[in-house]
Amino acid sequence: MLLVYTHKISPRIKYVFKHIFTRVLGIDVSFTTKIEKFIAHDSLKMSYTKQQLGNEFFIKSHDILFEQGLSDVEIHIHDWDETKGFFFNGEKSAIPFDIFASSFYLLSRYEEYLPQVRDEFGRFLATESIAFKHGFLHQPVVDIWAFKLKDALQNHFPDFNFPKRVYSIKPIIDVPSAYNYKLKGIMRTWGGAVKDLLRLKFKSLYNRFMVIFGLKHDPFDTFKYIINKQKQSRFKFVFFFLIGAYSTYDKGINANKKKFISLIKQVADYCIVGLKTSFFAIDNILVLKKEKLQMEAIINTSLTASRQSYSKLNLPESYRNLVELEIKEDYTMGYINHIGFRAGSCTPFLFYDLDYEVQTPLKIHSYHLMDYALLKTQSLLDKKKVLNQIINEIKEVNGEFVPVFHNYTFGNEPRWRGFKDLFNIILESVNED
């Protein structure tokens, strides 16, 4: 048990200290404002305040963890060994930066509450983040800082044994449409055929009818391949099926189709199944509740995980809706076109509501790579290099790697050629030293 002395125990302090010490470093933490209790504690301890009490392990505190709401936070990024740091706190401190304040800034997504340019879907852009602007998006800095803190504490308390955690993976399979041609209904099938004709896509037209007449395999139907991969892995894949109504943004399969329901049930026998919320469910809790109940009726159990369409998040409303509907985990936090760590961490963390100043029970599994981001690199060799780089970054801190692939990624479309090999690299990464 680590005891932390601070002049004020704020919700922000409890939140970020528990993430760094309990979730990342694996040790319990408690807090006190009483100097006598702090002095009497004969194990791991540190002070987090403005002035050092004596010669104890001390980190000078930044004001952000004692504030409420948003303020105009001044951030200056500095080099710190192989990484970056901000909220510099002077020479007397055991480490040169207040990593608790900076970790809170990243984990709470403080910057996403501030005014900034967004894309056509209203999404926060990677290029607007301080991580991208200052060149540390590719690093899980929160975890790196935590391990730097651990090293400093180990030097101060050489007899204390820190637990070790191990690298893990949590592959995500996103299913916006289970099939490309099958189960689309007469109107959509003929509409698609007319579009193929008008655009002179004769190969697509040919494939469409070959699949419909059962003479060819649907290119999006890769579920047998993925389930076979699941059988070979000790880490559970998480599937997210879109079951929302057809719209401009969502073009999935009708959730009343018996064959589609049967597919979801079959996948649920081997993998975790979550809900890919429709575009209109992102802002409308009634639509979200309807889709949640519909998915629960299909999988015959409580829905635990969700992922928003288009990886769109409206903070804090999107997450508040999930909390209200008692959905326990979300897998939306990440960037579609950039590889890296949107929240600066490869450790799942709880959503902190900055408006209400409260830690919620919603666990955020930030994803670090989407298959689309790998399309930016030309050759398969370059793709493998980029993938191995992100894996190595996470392995350095024994974190959890969360990659997002789609069901059609494993099909036969030319642009996805070699992606089965990339998926295998991820699965095999847990077996390497």
Image: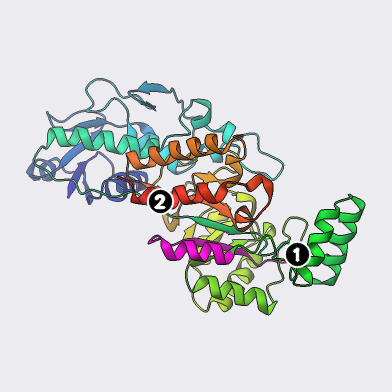
Snapshot quadrant of residue 125: top right
Query: SS at mark 2?
Result: helix
Farthest residue toward the front? 215
Q: What residue is at 63 percent from the left and 76 percent from the top?
A: 261
Tell me the quarter of the image containing the C terminus.
top left
The residue carrying pointer 1 sits among few (fewer than 14), some (14 to 19) or many (20 or more) residues within 10 Å by Cα, namely many
The residue carrying pointer 2 sits among few (fewer than 14), some (14 to 19) or many (20 or more) residues within 10 Å by Cα, namely few
Comparing 357 with 137, the one in front is: 137
Which x, y percent locates residue 119? 68, 39
The residues colored magenta run 223-246
In this picture, residue 310 sits left or right of residue 39: right
Comparing 118 with 144, the one in front is: 144
Snapshot quadrant of residue 194: bottom right
Residue assigned mark 2: 428
Residue assigned mark 1: 181
In this picture, residue 426 sits left or right of residue 225: left
Q: What residue is at 56 percent from the left and 48 percent from the top?
A: 419
Which x, y percent locates residue 114? 56, 36
